[in-house]
Image (spheres, rainbow, N blue to C red):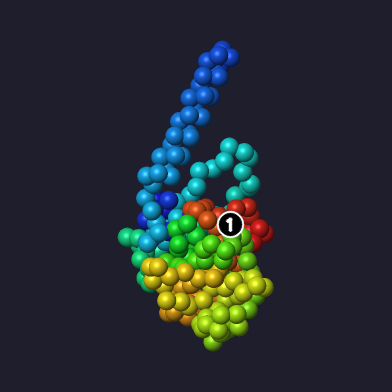
Amino acid sequence: MDSPLDLIRNRWLRAGAGTVAMALASLLAFNVGHDAAQMLFGKSQAEAAPAVHQAAPKPLAKAPAPAPVDSPFVVKSILKIEEPIKFGQFFWDESKSEPGPLVVTVDLEARTLSVFRNGHEIGATAILKGYGDKPTPTGVFPISEKDADHVSNIYDAPMPYMLRLTNDGVSIHGSKVEKGYATNGCIGVPDEFARRLFAQAKLGDRVIITDGKRIGVGDPIMAGTDHAL
């Protein structure tokens, strides 16, 4: 989510009081150094990212009860993608899929989008996203409108196979997905991928947009139970 989330997205005793204090200080120093090293030297996914996402470390706080393994919102299978997904490239394979609810996940950090049907990943692609004062928002959004031949009334630009997510125009739509391009907050995908997703998606289907979250086989597509969706 190995794992989508690393084949979507590379597709990321008891002791005296003094002893305890020293151990905690060392642990904090190690973690801070580790995080800094990741920020400085971690592999960039700007141009290409795996469609398979690796589960993020679990917090120490009590986690919500996991969804049943047969839930349509738990990852059951992922596409076999051996290399990072490049701009303009996509994968689509329904051979292992089953009828059931459709959920779309987007990882802005990895710049990838995955389509799950009944827990099976059937599609994955690299995306364009918004930057600066037009960022792509994060959150969970139901598809509120579909329009195969939509044209933006703000930018007078074609948005083929548009799936609307917000009232102010953020949507998934077909785009020229190439390095150096960006959107005004929308999620741009290759036109052919947009056409296939448009044919599968229904009004009310959920699109989950995160910024760096990875999931893998056996993980809930969204934290919590089925009812969270």
Query: Which residue is labeled 1 in the image?
Result: 222
Q: Left or right: 85 with respect to 197?
A: left
Q: Is residue 177 above or below residue 2?
A: below
Given the current orientation, which residue lies at the most extreme front position? 133
- Image quadrant containing the C terminus: bottom right
The residue under the point 62% across, 62% down is: 140
The residue under the point 42% across, 76% down is: 176
Quarter of the view holding residue 95:
bottom left
Amino acid at circle 1: Met
Q: Position of residue 141 (x, y in %)?
A: 63, 66
Given the current orientation, which residue lies at the most extreme bottom position? 149
The residue under the point 58% across, 14% down is: 17
Foreground residue among 4 and 12: 12
Q: Is residue 117 visible?
A: no
The residue under the point 52% across, 63% down is: 131
Q: Secondary structure at mark 1?
A: loop
